[in-house]
Image: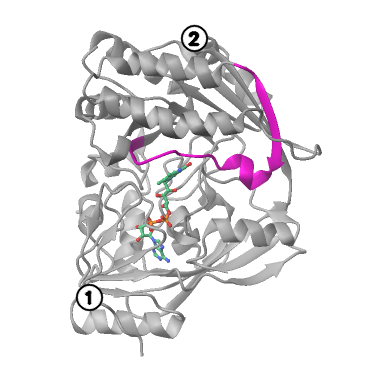
Amino acid sequence: MVVGCGGFKFQNWAETYGSSPELYFQPTCVEEIKEILDLARQRSKRVKVVGAGHSPSNIACTDDFMIRMDKMNKIIKVDKEKMQVTVEAGILLTDLNEELTKCGLALSNLGAISDVAAAGVIGTGTHNTGIHHGILATQVVTLTMMTASGDIVECSESVNAEIFQAGRVHLGSLGVILSITFQCKPAFHLQEIQFSSTLQEVLDNLDTHLNSSEYFRFFWFPHTENVTIFYQDPTDKPPSSKPNWFWDCFVGYYLLEFVLWISTFLPRMVPWINHFFFRLLFTSRTERVGISYKVFNFDCLFKQHVQDWAIPIEKTKDALLQLKTWLERNPQAVAHFPVEVRFARGDDILLSPCYHRDSCYMNIIMYRPYGKDVPHQDYWLEYEAIMKKVGGRPHWAKAHTCTRKDFEKMYPGFNKFNSTREKLDPTGMFLNAYLEKVFY
Ligand SMILES: Cc1cc2nc3c(=O)[nH]c(=O)nc-3n(C[C@H](O)[C@H](O)[C@H](O)COP(=O)(O)OP(=O)(O)OC[C@H]3O[C@@H](n4cnc5c(N)ncnc54)[C@H](O)[C@@H]3O)c2cc1C
């Protein structure tokens, strides 16, 4: 019999949100999950399933029952012919990447980190970049989940298609995801070429850049004109590392955190910091080659606040220039680097921020040096206002101020998703405070 423990304190990776679940479970099999849901039903408790707890919002918080899936983390099956892998939902992508490499396979795209669980990643619409690539959930072929009643439901394009259309970006609101089958491709190396440019140049030539590299993205350094462009493309070349990586890491970690901490007392230093680090680390052209997942992933340094909205791709220039103009007119507001700009193909997943449109994601960041909070409310609110004006949709994992009224306008399939959710979870067992704002 599965036993839940009391007194557990949950905190997300950035230590910006946390909660104290009444009971905390780490099931090892499907039968134990069923027992937990039975107990929750008997005691009228809500249930929150958590992956790796990396979401920078309260989406994974609860004060009722919490289920951590880290002991359900195995590879169930590798089908080399179809190039598909079926995994338990709690597997970390770090482990999946390594196992896939041994089988000569790889996921075709990944976000910045892999210390995240398969069901968590797809459930919040995690994305990377590449205009011919969808968000990570578009790589899903089949899902199985346990619903609030304890039944197991499988879904794919051909079986329970309506649930599948909702279930890939599920927000943790439909049931406990048990297993996922991903479409893979043959293992590959990526060559990354990094070079500097200006915001005007990259915005004027966006189509050229989008067509010049399979996985194109850029960093803009707020309060400056500076941009660093990254082209990542499959290659047959052998791995080679970036020159000066030791220096980069040292400067990135220790010096940046220290000067950002100083700037909490002297905010006017921030534009200077953005200039200085661009000159120090991002001006020279560099190249490296590595196994795909090691190039997709990069070091996100230290704790931070982030926002990341998807906007229609044709609004990229307009939105970035609006943000730049606002920062110029409001010198009291400071913005850390980088604003990371990525792209994704449109899809047909009901609550995907890229639903039915190719999108640009614009990720803004404010670091928390040594865990210290930095004022960011004005910047956050202005960014959100611009994103809404240009028809944006917020990343589900990241903090935002939107409510049901906003989502009904943003998502043509919102009501369809909600009615599927109500059918699968009529009593709201899988809701929490975050999801109540979304659905009520
Ligand atoms: C340093 C850092 C870098 C990041 N980089 C990127 C990036 O490049 N691109 C991007 O798009 N995002 C990025 N993110 C956001 C991250 O990808 C998402 O927050 C992702 O959801 C985290 O996965 P997780 O396993 O930690 O999920 P959690 O935060 O644990 O959970 C997320 C949601 O999934 C649900 N869930 C998890 N497992 C299950 C399950 N088995 N059944 C049902 N529901 C479940 C939870 O209930 C919750 O609603 C980053 C976050 C950090 C901290």
Q: Quadrant of the C terminus?
A: bottom left
The stretch in magenta equals 284-307
Q: Residue at x 62, y 44 (%)?
A: 294
- What residue is disc 2 on? 200
- Residue 391 visible in the snapshot: no
Q: Is residue 206 left or right of residue 175?
A: right
Q: Residue 297 appears at what percent x and percent y?
A: 56, 43
Q: Earlier in the sequence, mark 2 or mark 1?
A: 1
Amino acid type, mark 1: Gly
Q: Which residue is mark 1?
A: 6
Expressed as whole percent of the image width and height from the top left, the position of residue 255 reads 42, 28
Note whether residue 186 is visible: yes
Which of discs 2 and 1 lies nearer the camera? The answer is 1
Question: Is 167 located above or below residue 396 in the figure?
Answer: below
Which numbered tag is attached to residue 419? none
Crowdedness of circle 1 by 10 Å Cα count: few (<14), some, many (20+)? few
The coloring applied to the image is one colour
Q: Classify 10 Å Cα crowding around label 2: few (below 14), some (14-19), many (20 and above).
A: some
- Is disc 1 placed on a helix, strand or loop? loop
Can you give x and y, in whole percent of width and height, for residue 22 in the image?
A: 20, 72
